[in-house]
Amino acid sequence: MYIKICGLQTAETVAAATAAGADAVGFVFAPGSPRTISADLALELGREVPQGIETVGVFRNQSIDEVVDTARRAALTTVQLHGDETLADVARLRKEGFRTLRAFSAAAYSALDQVEKQAWESERILLDAVEPGTGETFDASDLHDGSPSGFWLLAGGLTPHNVAQLASTLRPQGVDISSGVESSRGVKDAQLIRDFIEAAQTIP
């Protein structure tokens, strides 16, 4: 089970995530979030991330030129697009040397036609609640035609207490959490991060 801890802002929580076994740590660059940080801070935090663990930047409806510039300045390995970005945008980012993740709400993914779904099957995608980062629970009923057939991450309302049940039911390849490991909005808790990773690692 691939595990991503998102919205990190401190060295303590980055260390907690990487030491506990996270496969990726995420930094938010989308405007308007209480978790948004600068490229300089992400660069500093990323220096402490062991090789082999992805450092992911989260962007939402920002120009691809801005995304590339920020990702380079932060020395990210991976860019996560959380808005209306296209397959062409994803291809551009890969050409620039980044791995990618493309986030959809479950409802938005289900609304894609079969040709569009097939086009995204070869990409890594993330299915989230309608409004990311709010703790709103993922609504599996939105997946009218079932889960994606390719690599996908489950996000939206996950906690250390429900991740095993939800992931065992929906069978994603990985899980992504942000607000579910916070002591208050935007403030990550190192022990909750460790608890979440431990719970996710029990999923067969």
Image (tube, rainbow, N blue to C red):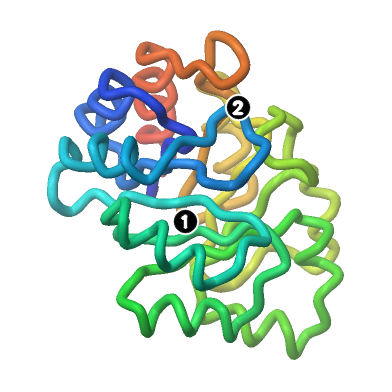
The image shows residue 144 at horizontal and vertical percentages of 85, 63
Above/below status of 138 relative to 119? above
The image shows residue 163 at horizontal and vertical percentages of 55, 31
The image shows residue 168 at horizontal and vertical percentages of 56, 42
Nearest to the observer: residue 127 or residue 64: 64
- Tell me if mark 2 has few (under 14), some (14-19) or many (20+) residues whose alpha carbon lies within 10 angstroms of its own: few
Q: Which residue was labeled with disc 1?
A: 173
Query: At 37% across and 29% down in the image, what residue appears?
Result: 197
Say which element carries label 2.
loop
Q: In which quarter of the image is the C terminus?
A: top left
Q: Which residue lies furthest to the bottom in this view?
A: 115
Above/below status of 36 relative to 189? below
Q: Earlier in the sequence, mark 1 or mark 2?
A: 2
Above/below status of 145 relative to 170? below
Marks 1/2: CA–CA distance: 28 Å
* Amino acid residing under circle 2: Pro
Give the label, 1 or 2, closer to the camera. 2
Q: Which residue was labeled with disc 2?
A: 34
- Tell me if mark 1 has few (under 14), some (14-19) or many (20+) residues whose alpha carbon lies within 10 angstroms of its own: some
Query: At 41% across and 57% down in the image, what residue appears?
Result: 70
Say which element carries label 1.
loop
* Amino acid residing under circle 1: Gln
